[in-house]
Amino acid sequence: MVATLAKHDVFQAIADPTRRKLLRLLVDREMSVNVISGHFPMSRTAVSKHLHILSDAGLVKERRSGRETRYRLQPEPLREVKRWLSFYERFWHDKMAALKDFAETEE
């Protein structure tokens, strides 16, 4: 029996601060693993593992260019996070409105 490797979900992928930094780094342009690795105090292998998790979650797209692999951001899966967070925005809005009311009554 062959076990299939489970794909990472978006929330799991962005839970790690290093992976969030990787996504921010890839916002404006495609980059090779070597270039990306230069931005982090870890080995190229460690960076590649993080990129693999992001790729499994659909957050980055990899492309072979000669001997190197290049990565670019695929932001579409982040919509799931945005939808999840939007549910809680009403609580933030309510708290800010209560703070405003409190501050105005203290004056």
Image (spheres, rainbow, N blue to C red):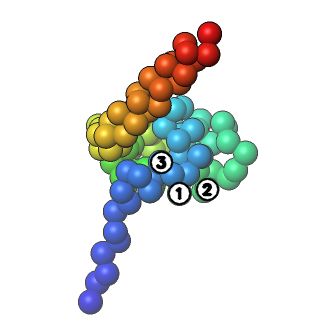
Indicate the quadrant where residue 62 lies.
top left
Q: Quadrant of the C terminus?
A: top right
Give me the residue at 53% from left, 57% from top. 49
Q: Is residue 104 above or below residue 30?
A: above
Q: Earlier in the sequence, mark 3 or mark 2?
A: 3
The picture places residue 85, in percent across and down from the top left corner, at 37, 40
Question: Mark 1, residues whose alpha carbon is within 10 Å: few (<14), some, or many (≥20)?
Answer: few
At label 2, which amino acid type do we have?
Answer: Ala
- Three-letter amino acid code at the position of disc 1: Lys
Q: Residue at x 59, y 46 (%)?
A: 17
Residue 49, label in figure? 1
Q: Is residue 78 visible?
A: no
- Find disc 3 in the rendering and name its residue: 14
**For the residue carrying disc 2, how many other residues have a C-alpha within 10 Å: few (<14), some (14-19), or many (20+)?**
few
The Cα–Cα distance between marks 1 and 2, rounded to whole angstroms, is 5 Å
Q: Quadrant of residue 63?
A: top left
Do tag 1 and tag 2 residues touch (Cβ < 8 Å)?
A: yes
Which mark sits nearer the N-terminus, 1 or 3?
A: 3
Marking on residue 46? 2
Q: Disc 2 on helix, strand or loop?
A: helix
Helix, strand or loop for disc 1: helix
Q: Residue at x 67, y 38 (%)?
A: 38
